[in-house]
Image (spheres, helix red, strand yellow):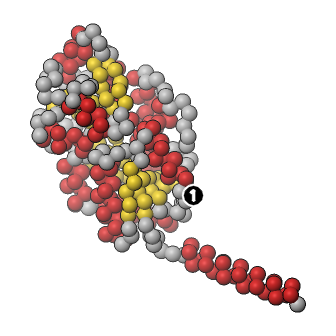
Amino acid sequence: MRFRIAIVLWLATASAGMMGWQQASAEPYPSRRINLIVPFPAGSATDGVTRHLAESIRIQTGATVLVENKPGADGNLAALAVLKADADGYTVFVTTNSTQAANVSLFNAMPYDPKADFAPVAGIMTIPMMLSVKPDFPAKDIKEFIALAKSRPKPVSFGSGNTSSRGAAELFRSRAGIEMQHVPYRGMPQALTDVLGGEIDCVFADPASAQGLIQDGRLRVLAVTSSERLKGLPDVPTLAQAGLPGAELTAWVGVFVRAGTPPDIVAKLSQVVLAFVSSKETDTYLESVGAKPFPAGPDELGSFQAADTRRWAEIVEIAKIEKK
């Protein structure tokens, strides 16, 4: 008799648990807080666009959205934080070509697989780098910069706040045939601070991080790494226009989640992100920071990521960047 009662109670408990699981799995997405993980510090280009994205997600879905900055190891620390979370769409990686394309060619051993461990959701923006110096830096253009670098007894020093920043500088160094000393930073704001303080000579900065300093006259831009001039800096030439072709490099920002996230959640999140990217408000914001919209869905972003991974392998080989 006791055995029968125990069986009945077990079945009732199991049934209740199954019903609870079914209800939880059937909850509409999103039904709780979404965490947006950013691999760079506050004040960076990725951080800036992520905070605009967070507000758009909140308005579109009604969900609470938290932005978490986890800088370090060229974004690898943030990537690992995302992979430690559940594959449920509530921990979202707003990241760049650093973690998803370049790092596999820059590190001897990667703690994750950018392709196998993540599912692409949507692209957000592309953004160039700018060779930036203090207003009183002796060189006034790229030709003078190269001549100065060749005449100095010690190499010109450059800071990098992210992988794209370093990649642009190393590619420039290689194409120009000059020596440059690399000084790494955890983020672009710190690198810019040391340029202003005279601790380093220059930095390849993104427009979003540097625009305030440029507007205030505290930073001067010699050239941009894009194929076209920036609307906000019409008098600044591209590297090719300045006489150094083959040094173009454009960074990108996109959204990823852990591999294994349910396809319907990936599709819903992609729809929300692309609605943000296609809005007039976002277009205005991106133009103001020297970026362009990158409205790629999951498949397109995945293909773009694969192509850019190959591109970064070529950049590392051309610039002879030593792996970490």
Q: Quadrant of residue 180?
A: top left
Q: Quadrant of residue 316?
A: top left
Tell me which residue sits at (34%, 45%) in the image: 41
What amino acid is found at the position of numbered circle 1 in the picture? Gly
Tell me which residue sits at (11%, 36%) in the image: 217
Q: Is residue 172 above or below residue 92?
A: above
Tell me which residue sits at (48%, 44%) in the image: 77
Q: How many marks?
A: 1
Q: Is residue 324 above or below residue 2?
A: above
Residue 204: image x %, image y %? 28, 32
The N terminus, quarter of image: bottom right
Outermost residue, bottom side: 1
Instruction: Judge left or right: residue 85 versus residue 134.
Output: right
Residue 38: image x %, image y %? 39, 50
Instruction: Judge left or right: residue 6 versus residue 46.
Output: right
Label 1 sits on residue: 260
- Regarding residue 122, the answer to whether it shows in the image is no
Residue 318: image x %, image y %? 41, 23
